[in-house]
Image: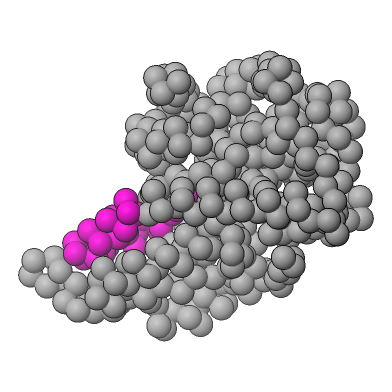
Amino acid sequence: MFFKKRKVLTGAMAAALAVGLAACGSDGASTEGDNGASGGETYDWRFVVEETEGQVQYEYAQEFAERLNEKTDGQVNIDVYDFGSLGSEVDQVEGVQQGMFEMGIISPGFTGGLVAEGQVFSLQFLFPDDQEVTQEILNTSEALNTHLVELYEAQNLKPLAFMSEGAMQWTGNRELRTPEDFNGFKMRTQSSPLMLETYGAYGADPSPLSWSELYVSLDRGVVDGQENPIFFIEDASFHEVQDHMTISNHNTYVAMVTINPGIYNDLPEDIRTALDETVEEMRDRGFEIQDQLNEELLDSIVNDTDNPTEVIELTEEERAEFRELQLPIRDFFRDEIIGDEGREMFDLLLEEIAEHE
């Protein structure tokens, strides 16, 4: 599978394009009836994702768009824009905040400066190893779906759902089996302050970098390795420029399905109900999409004889070494990164995780 390169627009260019598209957007598109119904008006939305065709977010968004269009009898029409089409990850966050894009799938790692508590998903060895159990927590957690959502809404961003894209694995230009293997290792991270602390605990040299630059940076040795779910490693062809992949399952890649809160609150009741129903329907479907892609593309990496990759699966004893080093990072997150409101959220989340385990 080839690496799909995309030209990334600047924030200003993305904004200009969004203004040009606004004429066919949702602004002024609805006229509610006496019962709060939409009156048959149509809505043309932009749904931005951080991935490309064939990857989890893109496939999720396409199916979401189809289901909502059918559920509203064609009243809501959604165009899905893959990564780079309307700017960088940060541009996409700002675009949803400002209402230039109605919806977006966003990684909390790129909102750490906006909502510090969202960095909770960067904590390694926090959620259960069982991905189905983790997704159940993401679906039902009061800490996440009430308290964390409120913190994002205060920043003009409304999470509708939290979705697992699968367990995270490490790739590197050398074997990564023990914490000592990370000494001086230039690890690509998202722009999350907590991620810098996380990999610093292993002795690594964390380097924030957009994924649009990552393939070339790995190829040229600008960074030594990275972390991602298996489907992304294969589809972005990172295994072509990395000799080793460690099945570490050290974290779950969590993304947020978001909408601009003003747009959501202004929707007629029937459209908002259809949107909420689609979100619920896609919880299980999103999990199925990631599960299938991660399984199939692991086989692709293992069987790629043109780009041989040494696949290492950590034992529980080896994982325990990394887990031990991450326990103080939880204290750092609780005591140094978040405030009182965030601490209440985090303590509740720990209780919820313990109940599931």
Horizontal side of 74 relative to 141 (left or right) equals: left
Majority secondary structure of magenta residues: helix
Query: Which quadrant is home to the N terminus?
Result: bottom right
Query: Which quadrant is home to the C terminus?
Result: top left
Horizontal side of 217 relative to 235 (left or right) equals: right
Residue ID at (90%, 32%): 184
**Image: 297 above or below 149:** below
Task: Report the magenta residues as a range.
Answer: 255-281
**Image: 350 above or below 206:** above
Residue ID at (40%, 63%): 64
Q: 36 or 16: nearer the eye? A: 36
Residue 306 can be seen, yes or no: yes
Horizontal side of 38 relative to 199 (left or right) equals: left
Q: Position of residue 119 (x, y in %)?
A: 57, 36
Q: 246 or 332: nearer the eye? A: 246
Residue ID at (51%, 31%): 130
**Image: 288 above or below 77:** above
Could you say which quadrant of the image residue 356 lies in?
A: top left
Residue 272 on the magenta segment: yes
Residue 173 on the magenta segment: no
Could you say which quadrant of the image residue 192 lies in?
A: top right
Q: Position of residue 2 (x, y in %)?
A: 74, 67
Residue 158 can be seen, yes or no: no
Q: Position of residue 354 (x, y in %)?
A: 44, 18
Could you say which quadrant of the image residue 191 lies in?
A: top right
Q: Position of residue 355 (x, y in %)?
A: 39, 19
